[in-house]
Amino acid sequence: KSSSSSLSALEFLKTSAADRYTRESSSILVIGLNYRTASIELREKLSIAENQWPRAIEELCDLNHIEEAAILSTCNRLEIYVVALSQQRGIREVIEWASKKSTVPVSELRKHSFLLINKDAARHLFEVSSGLDSLLLGEGQILSQVKQVVKIGQGVPGFDRKISGLFKHAITVGKRVRTETNISSGSVSVSSAAVELAVMKHPESTVNPLVIGAGKMGKLVIKHLAAKGCRKMVVVNRTQDRVASIGEELEGVEIEYRPLTRMLASAAESQVIFTCTSSESLLFTEEQVRKLLPPPRLFVDISVPRNVDPSVSEIEGVRLYNVDDLKEVVAANREERLQRAAEAEAIIDEEVKQFEAWKNSLETVPTIKKLRAYAERIRSSEVEKCISRMGGSSDVPAGNKKAVYDMSMGIVNKLLHGPMQHLRCDG
């Protein structure tokens, strides 16, 4: 009976003020959808641009049962990570928020999304940062995107200790997996797979291609085209500086910069067009493409939201591919690294345990401090009463006072030893 009441007291101490209302400790949740669960048509509706992440975090944390939040939005996934005071209420609030933000019905979101909680949520993010959950197994760009979550989240209210710690740990795991395994050896990125796909479909893809966008994805497309032997290309971008900088990195490659105002004219001169911008509106409509010089013409659109109207594929002589079509390239690339993935999973198992221990310590350490402080207040009060009964502090010999003090400390330490061990093991 005393053991039972001791545990009850410990559980009470471990319950925060907010949790006393819900009788449920806070949980880390991830609610998301990716290339496995949702089509590109749905993913692009839910895509959240990087410059909107801080506002999204604040909006999520304004919800009644959400304490912390982070957004990971890429061409292949949208994942919302939160610390929720109540699992069920938190899940409902996040899904309703995403529905309102995207105008996608709640029923549709539930049908195509996945939910992972606590340890499973941490494992998932570690697999994501390691490239194990990527369409292109072992690809490196996702780790940069996870780093970007931390960079953008710093200082944003709601990107707090648990979520920040989770993402920082994920970066460490991603680096460790790539260092200790060969998961990234010979791996492909979305950009390199786009170039591979273009060459598979149109062997002359490296002859005077057009690249629209010179951001991270565009830069990689340009570099992979150069690696495939392309010596001349046109790059359309909002500013010239970035294109010039890329040109300086590539020896023997002629890169001609053109502004966005010349995009359609440039497209008319090229048979192969790569689009990789962050534009939220279409760059090529069916009507515009029909007006270009006679086909054949190949579009590889790796933007999410997409830059090219899907109906363009209905034009005779025009072929259009998006990120979901990269699976052809993946098939040849994936098998050779599946064995290496097993090594990575072993590392992730270890790292999940470490993260769980850290997360639990956030609650355990304050609880231990509270318990010690509570015991010390009682001990100090009782020692004072005892000394008073013995004649008062001035009349009791120092040796006797020390004996009483030592005895009180010994009793408290022995009484606390069991509960402290229980707390540490539980945490």
Image (tube, rainbow, N blue to C red):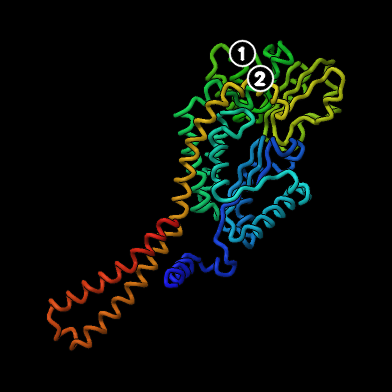
User: At which x and y percent is residue 108?
Assistant: 78, 47
User: How many C-alpha atoms fall within 10 Å of the one at disc 2: few (<14), some, or many (≥20)?
Assistant: many
Amino acid type indicated by mark 1: Lys
User: How many C-alpha atoms fall within 10 Å of the one at disc 1: few (<14), some, or many (≥20)?
Assistant: some
Quadrant hosting residue 282: top right
What secondary structure is marked by label 2? helix
Relative vertical location of residue 96 with respect to residue 223 in this rendering, above or below:
below
Amino acid type indicated by mark 2: Val
Q: Which residue is mark 1?
A: 228
Along the viewing direction, whichever of 244 and 158 lies nearer the viewer = 158
Q: Which residue is mark 2?
A: 195
Q: Is residue 271 left or right of residue 74?
A: right
- Does any portion of residue 54 appear in the rendered image? no
Q: Is residue 292 left or right of residue 247?
A: right
Q: Are marks 2 and 1 in contact (CB under 8 Å)?
A: yes
Q: Residue at horizontal 22%, vertical 88%? A: 389
Along the viewing direction, whichever of 220 and 241 lies nearer the viewer = 220
Quadrant hosting residue 385: bottom left
Along the viewing direction, whichever of 181 and 247 lies nearer the viewer = 181
Relative vertical location of residue 320 with respect to residue 418 in this rendering, above or below:
above
N-terminal of the pair, mark 2 or mark 1, is: 2
- Does any portion of residue 145 appear in the rendered image? yes
Placement of the C terminus among the 4 image quadrants: bottom left
Which numbered disc covers residue 213? none
